[in-house]
């Protein structure tokens, strides 16, 4: 289930943000990484970031559990092109359980059935084979390999571009 983040999600968010393994294949400037206080992050996310259409970050909850196991993000909205990008990150204890694949499926299904989105994109570091597999399972097609992008590191990040 994808849902709005709430204050009771703070312990899971703190665990997520503290994990170097989770963020090793992700940009350095992700919204949640800009805050020391996750309560403030949640307020800012839904107070300014979402209304400005910069990004929508939702918690991923496995039904019956009550707590989040990761984040699903819609970003880079281009209304004029009916295009948006998706991203995700999960607590290590959720890895290998199919949660990422199901999350991307829900994201894509929502965009194509409930909005006027016509193009969904994603980017992965070329080393991130697990994320590449998640996208492939959800009918994304790699359209460019080894593209230099600015992900906030000292050197350009070499990434693959995906379309669905």
Image (tube, rainbow, N blue to C red):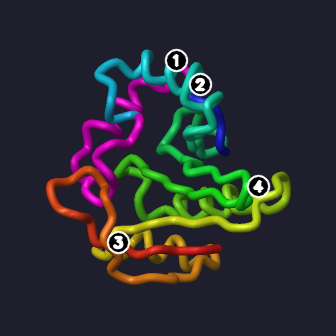
Give 59 or 40, whichever is nearer the viewer. 40
- Residue 19, given in percent of the width and then of the height, sits at 26, 44
- Contact, mark 2 vs mark 3 (Cβ under 8 Å): no
> What residue is pinned by disc 3?
159
> What residue is pinned by disc 4?
110
Q: Give the range drawn in magenta.
A: 6-31
| Secondary structure found at label 2 | helix
What quarter of the picture does the C terminus occupy? bottom right
Mark 3 nearby-residue class (10 Å; few <14, some 14–19, many ≥20): many
> What residue is pinned by disc 2?
46
As measured in the structure, the alpha-carbon distance from the residue carrying label 2 to the one carrying label 3 is 29 Å
Residue at 20% x, 53% y is 153
Question: Which one is earlier in the sequence, the residue at label 1 or at label 4?
Answer: 1
Say which mark, if any, is on residue 105.
none
Is 115 drawn above or below residue 160 in the view shown?
Answer: above
Q: Is residue 140 left or right of residue 91?
A: right
As measured in the structure, the alpha-carbon distance from the residue carrying label 3 to the one carrying label 4 is 26 Å
Question: Which one is earlier in the sequence, the residue at label 2 or at label 3?
Answer: 2
Residue 70 in the magenta stretch? The answer is no
Residue 18 in the magenta stretch? The answer is yes
Is 27 drawn above or below residue 54 in the view shown?
Answer: below
Mark 1 nearby-residue class (10 Å; few <14, some 14–19, many ≥20): some
């Amino acid at each position: 289930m994808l849902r709005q983040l709430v204050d009771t999600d703070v312990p899971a968010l703190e665990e997520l943000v503290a994990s170097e393994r989770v963020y090793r294949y992700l940009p350095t400037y992700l919204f949640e990484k800009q805050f020391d206080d996750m309560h403030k992050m949640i307020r800012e996310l839904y107070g300014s970031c979402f209304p400005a259409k910069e990004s929508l970050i939702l918690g991923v909850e496995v039904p019956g559990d009550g707590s989040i196991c990761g984040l699903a993000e819609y970003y880079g909205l281009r209304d004029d092109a009916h295009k948006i990008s998706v991203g995700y990150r999960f607590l290590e204890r959720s890895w290998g359980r199919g949660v990422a694949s199901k999350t991307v499926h829900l994201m894509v299904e929502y965009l194509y059935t409930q909005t006027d989105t016509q193009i969904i994109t994603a980017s992965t570091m070329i080393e991130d084979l697990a994320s590449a597999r998640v996208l492939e399972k959800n009918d994304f097609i790699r359209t460019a390999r080894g593209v230099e992008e600015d992900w906030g590191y000292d050197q350009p990040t070499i990434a693959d571009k995906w379309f669905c």
